[in-house]
Amino acid sequence: MSEENSTSNQSSEANNKAERRKLKILAFHGYIQNATVFKGKIGSFRKAVSKLAQLVFLSAPHKVFSDDGTGDEDARSWWFNAEDNTYSGKCLGGPALGFEDSLRIIEEVVKDHGPFDGFMGFSQGACLVGLLAAMQQKGYLPYTFKFAIFASGFRSGSLVHKGFYDEDIDLPSLHVYGESDSIIPKEMSESLINLFVRPIVAEHSGGHYVACSGSIKDAYLDFLHDRYQDIIGNEEQEKR
C-alpha cells in the first residue's frame, strides 16, 4: 500500500489551508498492475488533485501467472473470471475467483487506515469500485464511502455479481472513459454509468488510460471541489 501527501508553501494563507484536511481517496489499480505501478502511471492526476485529495494506493492480493506458471510479483488481479486464473473485462458468465479475498483486504485497509471519503479505480479497479458502490447501496459493506471516480469503468460479467446491479446507485460519481478505448469500449463504460442516479460523465478522444488534461482535468477538479465542500465543509460547520 502506498500513501502520499502534498506539501504546502510557507505563506500564512497556505498554512491555514494546510490545516484543513484533504479528501482521503482509496485508489484501485487495473489488471496486471499494482499500487506502485498505478501510482506511477497517474502522475498527472495526482498532481492535479494534490491540493484537494490525499491518495492511498492498494495492491490486489492475487498474482497473475504467466503461461509457464511463474508468478510476477508486480502483476496483480482483484479476481479472475476464468478457470485458468486469468481475467478479461469482456468475459460474460464466468466466475469471480478470489473476489472474497479482495473484499477482506479492503475491509482491513479501511479499518486500519480509513475512513476514506471516496474510492477511485481504473479498469478492473473501476469495475471493483462499481461493485463496492452497488454493495454499499444494498447495505452489504461494513464501511461507507461518499463518492466514486471511475476511469474506464464497466460492469462485471461474473455470474455471482449479476445480482448486485439490480438497484440504482445513489452515490456521487464521476465517470471518465476514452472514445477510442478498445480494451473497455465506451459502451461498457456507459452500461455502468446507467446504474447511477446522478452520474457526471467526461469522455476523451483517447484510449485505455487515466486521462488528465484539458476538460478532463477540469472535470476531476470540479467534482472533487464539490465533494470537498459537501464533506469537509459540512464537517467544519458541525464543529462551530
Image (tube, grey):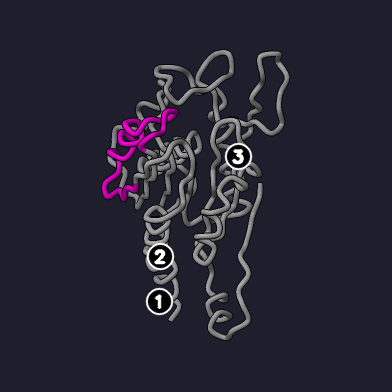
The local crowd at label 1, few if under 14, some if 14 to 19, many if 20 or more residues have their Cα within 10 Å, is: few
**225 over 213 or under it: above or below:** below
Q: Position of residue 50 (x, y in %)?
A: 54, 63
Residue type at the position of mark 2: His
Q: Position of residue 205 (x, y in %)?
A: 37, 41
Nearer the observer, disc 2 or disc 1?
2
Residue located beneath label 3 in the image: 105
Dividing the picture into quadrants, the one containing residue 179 is: top left
Residue located beneath label 2 in the image: 225
**170 over 195 or under it: above or below:** below
Q: Which mark sits nearer the N-terminus, 2 or 3? A: 3
Q: Considering the numbered disc 2 on the image, is that residue within a helix, a strand or a loop?
A: helix
The local crowd at label 2, few if under 14, some if 14 to 19, many if 20 or more residues have their Cα within 10 Å, is: some
Q: Position of residue 177 (x, y in %)?
A: 39, 41
Magenta range: 179-202
Q: Considering the numbered disc 3 on the image, is that residue within a helix, a strand or a loop?
A: helix
Q: Residue at x 31, y 33 (%)?
A: 191
Residue located beneath label 1 in the image: 237
Pick the residue in front: 181 or 224.
181
- Check residue 197 for magenta coloring: yes
Dividing the picture into quadrants, the one containing residue 207 is: top left
